[in-house]
């Protein structure tokens, strides 16, 4: 059995000079020569909202868009319903990642967002953020970079890949995303259900369970309910290479 995995990451608020540990814009600001104390104009744009309870919607498809949000703690799932009412999972968002970027062009959210566990967000007024970005090229570039990453996630699994390749890519992607934010990359808890994972990967739920068992039998991972420990990161990355286009 796995030792207790680290709880869902929660951001460190920093102080008057240091950014929150999962701030999506800190790198761009620091690269532009601004520390937190010099960015009071940006800081007042930030509003902590929540906590949203597990299963509570943050926004729904068609809602008016006027803000983007970063996950401060917890996990968010985005999804749409097709013409037959079936749910199609579009993505999962971890601490430090932005939700709502896909709404910029139409000024309305094109999907639903729901909390998978108690979740707190940092809300940024988009009109104010866009105005500030015109005076801070680094911030503007970071917004474009985040939007590009959002588009890339949506296209990640569009190819004709095997169930093993898709699952390997999913686990490697989660590992890297946690690592970027300073959290353990090889031991984490899945806040999404296996049904949600299967939906996102466009697999049957039974296929997800079989792949987990096969990966565990092969010594790639260790699984205890929703707790995952990656035992052979390089082997998993090799399996995911074609999906991740590396």
Image (cartoon, rainbow, N blue to C red):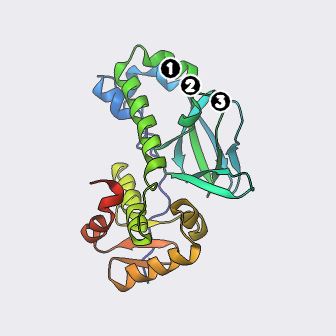
Q: Position of residue 55 (x, y in %)?
A: 69, 56
Pick whichever, 185 or 167, lies toward us. 167
Q: Nearer the viewer, residue 33 or 176?
A: 176
Quarter of the figure with residue 25? top left
Question: Disc 2, disc 3: CB below 8 Å?
Answer: yes
Element on which disc 3 rests: loop
Residue tagged 2? 126
* Gap in angstroms between the C-alphas marked 1 and 3: 14 Å
Q: Which residue is mark 1?
A: 130
Dots 1 and 3: beta carbons under 8 Å?
no
Q: Quadrant location of the N terminus? A: bottom left
Sequence-wise, the earlier of marks 2 and 3 is 3
Q: Residues within 10 Å of mark 3 (few under 14, many from 20)?
A: many
Residue at horizontal 46%, vertical 41%?
Answer: 151
Query: Are circles 1 and 2 on residues that touch, CB within 8 Å?
Result: yes
**Location of residue 228 (image quadrant):** bottom left
Q: Position of residue 18 (x, y in %)?
A: 37, 34
Residue at 38%, 18% in the rendered image: 136
Kindly identify which numbered label has been placed on residue 199: none
Discs 2/3, front: 3
Element at label 2:
helix
Cα gap from disc 2 to disc 3, whole angstroms: 9 Å
Q: Can residue 54 be seen in this snapshot?
A: no
């Amino acid at each position: 059995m796995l030792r207790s995995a680290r709880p869902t990451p929660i951001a460190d608020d920093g102080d008057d000079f240091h950014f929150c540990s999962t701030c999506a814009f800190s790198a761009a600001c620091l690269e532009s020569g601004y520390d937190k104390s010099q960015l009071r104009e940006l800081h007042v744009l930030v509003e902590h909202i929540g906590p949203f309870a597990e299963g509570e919607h943050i926004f729904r498809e068609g809602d008016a868009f006027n803000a983007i949000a970063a996950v401060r703690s917890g996990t968010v799932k985005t999804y749409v319903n097709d013409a037959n009412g079936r749910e199609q999972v579009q993505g999962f968002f971890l601490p430090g990642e932005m939700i709502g970027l896909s709404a910029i062009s139409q000024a309305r959210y094109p999907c639903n967002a729901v909390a998978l566990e108690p979740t707190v967000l940092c809300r940024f007024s988009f009109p104010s953020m866009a105005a500030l970005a015109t005076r801070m090229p680094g911030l503007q570039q970071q917004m474009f970079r985040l939007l590009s990453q959002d588009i890339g996630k949506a296209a990640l699994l569009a190819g004709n890949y095997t169930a093993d390749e898709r699952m390997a890519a999913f686990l490697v992607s989660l590992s890297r995303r946690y690592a970027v934010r300073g959290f353990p990359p090889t031991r984490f808890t899945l806040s999404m259900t296996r049904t949600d994972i299967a939906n996102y990967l466009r697999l049957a739920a039974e296929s997800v369970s079989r792949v987990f068992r096969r990966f565990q039998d092969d010594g790639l991972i260790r699984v205890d309910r929703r707790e995952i420990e990656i035992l052979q990161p390089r082997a998993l990355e090799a399996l995911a290479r074609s999906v991740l286009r590396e």
